[in-house]
Image: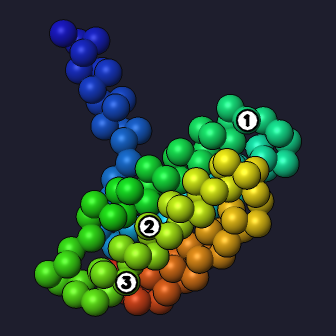
Amino acid sequence: MRSANAAYNLYQQNSVSVESPAKLIEMLYEGILRFASQARRHIELQDIEKKIYYINRVTDIFTELLNILDYDKGGEVAVYLTGLYTHQIKLLTQANVENNCEKIDTVINVVKGLLEAWREIYQNELGR
């Protein structure tokens, strides 16, 4: 039993703590940037397996962002983001099929803009 408690305590210490929904969105955008950069790198290296892995990670994050949109609170912004996120998934699919770094770059630039805007809007909640 002691071993189980030690394992649980270690897990608790290493688990990621998200203070707010705003912080979670920031982390998701940062994840997109990190994984999209890796996907781009692996396109250049012609490493198909890793390219697909990282493109799938980015697509999964966009899918999660789509799933957590609140249309009641977000209204037109949520509708706009639905279209924007869906278009990024389309670009990622095309980048995957065509081995196209430019489409990955487009996704990166869009998300950099989203992250910058998000940080500006929620700077108090993000502790900035």
Q: Which residue is mark 3?
A: 80
The amino acid beneath tag 2 is: Thr
Q: How many marks?
A: 3
- Residue nearer the viewer, 10 or 40: 40
Residue carrying label 1: 48
Work out how far the residue at label 3 is from the one at label 2, CA to CA, in angstroms.
10 Å
Amino acid type of the residue tagged 1 in the rendering: Ile
Helix, strand or loop for disc 3: helix
**Which residue in the protein does label 2 denote?**
86
For the point 40% across and 89% down, the residue is 121
Q: Tell me what residue is drawn at x 68 percent, y 32 percent.
A: 49
Rendered location of residue 81, percent (x, y):
38, 78
Sequence-first tag of 2 and 1: 1
Identify the residue at image location x=68%, y=62%: 104
The percent coordinates of residue 108 (x first, y second) are: 64, 69
Residue 1 or residue 51, whichever sits in front: 51
Decide if residue 8 is in sight here: yes
SS at mark 2 in the image: helix
Q: Secondary structure at mark 1?
A: helix
